[in-house]
Amino acid sequence: MSLYRRTLVYFRPFLGPTIFATLLTLVAIGFNLLRPVPFAYIVDGLLTPSGAAHASAQVQLAYWFGNASPQVIVIALCAAIVLINLLAGIINLVTNLIFVRVGLSALLKLRTELYAYLQSLPLKFHDSRRSADSSFRVAYDSQAIQTIYNKGFSNIFQCVVTLLWTFVVMLRMDWKLALVSLGIVPLMVATIRYYALRIRTESTTIQERESAVLTVAQEGLASVRMVHAFGREDWEVGQFHKSARQSLQATLKLTGTNMRSALVISTLMAFGTAAMYCIGSLHILAGTLSLGDLTKFIFYLTMLYQPLEQLTYTAWALEGAAAGMQRCFEVLDREDDVKDMPGAAEITETQGGIRLEDVAFGYDEARLILKGVNVEVLPGQTVAFVGGTGAGKSTLISLVPRFYDPNAGRVLLDGRDVKTITKKSLRNQISIVLQDTLLFSTTIRENIAYSLPGATEEQIIQAAKRAQAHEFIMAMPDGYASQVGERGGHLSVGQRQRLGIARAFLKNAPILLLDEPTSALDPTTEAAIMETIKDLMRGRTTLIITHRIATVHDMEKIVVLKNGTVVEQGTGPELVACGGAYAELYHSANLG
């Protein structure tokens, strides 16, 4: 299916308003064709005193106005010009409002679908691209659909109908002049084809450059504390200037292409106009064309060339918009490689037994992060995963909620392959507390309730109390209605972590995943947070990742990973006695 046909799908729900606006467009075109008629009658019936055209116009004026004076007739015909223009303008206004509304509605539909699909795509997709680029496609590239509709489909229809009607009228008036007027069309078509591909390519480059500008700005402003801390303001400005200059150069290149193409088109139109003036004047001198008819012909020539010019610029606008739509469809065409299997079952409860069987995973098949992993976690058991940086710990627990699917092997929940369970119902059984708790720029209440939509105030407060967050929340000026700032910037690291734990308490899921929940905390805060986490872990199947051996040494089971493989499993004392990889970690932490 072509890009434009795919775009039309978004307008199917608005077919009724589109048809109505199209019919109004036909009426407006009819009024536009009437615009030169009153003045032509003034010229032929009143200002030109002799000739066949004068006699014919006089008869028609006498039929309409009787014995009215020439002054009255002139005023009436000029009033008719105003009335025709007013009616045409009102119809055009209504039509444009309908087209704009339909275009904006389609834009809303596309943006929502694009954002929803981005939300559903697996983390592997988001890991491989910049978030600012995805944001740019949702916010800016999607606007191309409105351009395609308002400047494309609706504009093309109006221009084509205007061209046909105007050409028929001109052909009946003087077929030679009509053919001369259309003589430039083949040259204009060739010009459009020549510049169209260049405009699409250069438009794509601009959108990529603008996306890069947004990325640099977003990353620089999001990391402004680090920028200030290291005194890198000038370097960041330099990076932004470099990216913005590349965007400027791409824009200048496209602008130059547009200006050159506009010069070619205007020259062709000037040539056609001059040829018509020349032949029209010769026809008047030969007595085969009246001055009034030439006046109408000049007006119709304008009506003929105006849609031709609009079609030219529409074609180039469509090429620019096509670049944006192509970037949108690139996302929508991206296959979800972590999707629900046909017939996947929904689960409402789980015992929490987890087993990994010969699991291998890599972001690309040439470089595996996990290789041949076999781990079993019993229902209600707490298992810690330890190992050096890059051992694959975070990747391993990310397979349980299906943030990724393994390249080989299986992940089982209560003996059932997680691929046979719907992602939504699977994740409803899992709570996650990360090293850096992500908070949204809203209130504390809404951040805690994010894990359980529709939670009552009492449930939110109870979860905060269990996370030992209630006290500091109530000390804030607006309590639970206090704003946390962007990414929780108004709170300390420990406070943000407690809100993340409160979310987990509120969700009350039977499986708990903890990814370095205390690594960013000082020892005193870590000890307090761990007491809260131990309360959260009670009665749940828990997988915890940490570099701090003292935190997990006494847990039920410890799994040691090295270079993506499981090298040891057992309790802390057992593994220390073995004198292997865990014992090395244990002694390097000065624990024994």
Image (tube, rainbow, N blue to C red):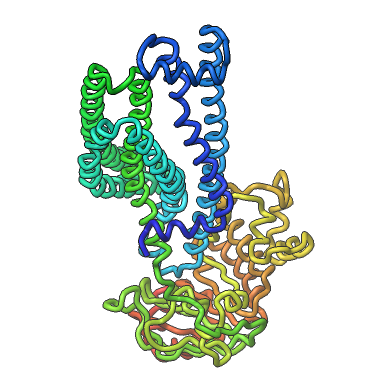
Could you tell me which residue is drawn at 60 percent across and 72 percent down? 431
Instruction: Indicate the position of residue 369 as horizontal and vertical percent values.
Output: 34, 77
Left or right, 319 with reference to 115: left
Where 47 falls versus 191 (above or below)?
above
> Residue 374 sits in which quadrant?
bottom left
The residue positioned farthest toward the right in the image shown: 458
Instruction: Indicate the position of residue 209 as horizontal and vertical percent values.
Output: 31, 46
Left or right, 88 with reference to 387: right
Q: Is residue 135 visible?
A: yes
Q: Which residue is more in the foreground, 263 or 236? A: 263
Q: Which residue is more in the foreground, 401 or 381? A: 401
Left or right, 110 with reference to 287: right
* Quadrant location, the C terminus: bottom left
| Number of residue marks | 0
> Residue 235 sits in which quadrant?
top left
* Quadrant location, the N terminus: bottom left
Where 374 falls versus 143 (above or below)?
below
Where 185 falls versus 341 (above or below)?
above
Q: Which residue is more in the foreground, 285 or 306? A: 285
Could you tell me which residue is drawn at 70 percent across and 53 percent down? 473
Could you tell me which residue is drawn at 41 percent across and 83 percent down? 583
Instruction: Indicate the position of residue 463 as horizontal and vertical percent values.
Output: 71, 65
Could you tell me which residue is drawn at 54 percent across and 79 percent down? 543
Q: Is residue 590 visible?
A: no
Instruction: Indicate the position of residue 50 as horizontal and vertical percent values.
Output: 36, 11
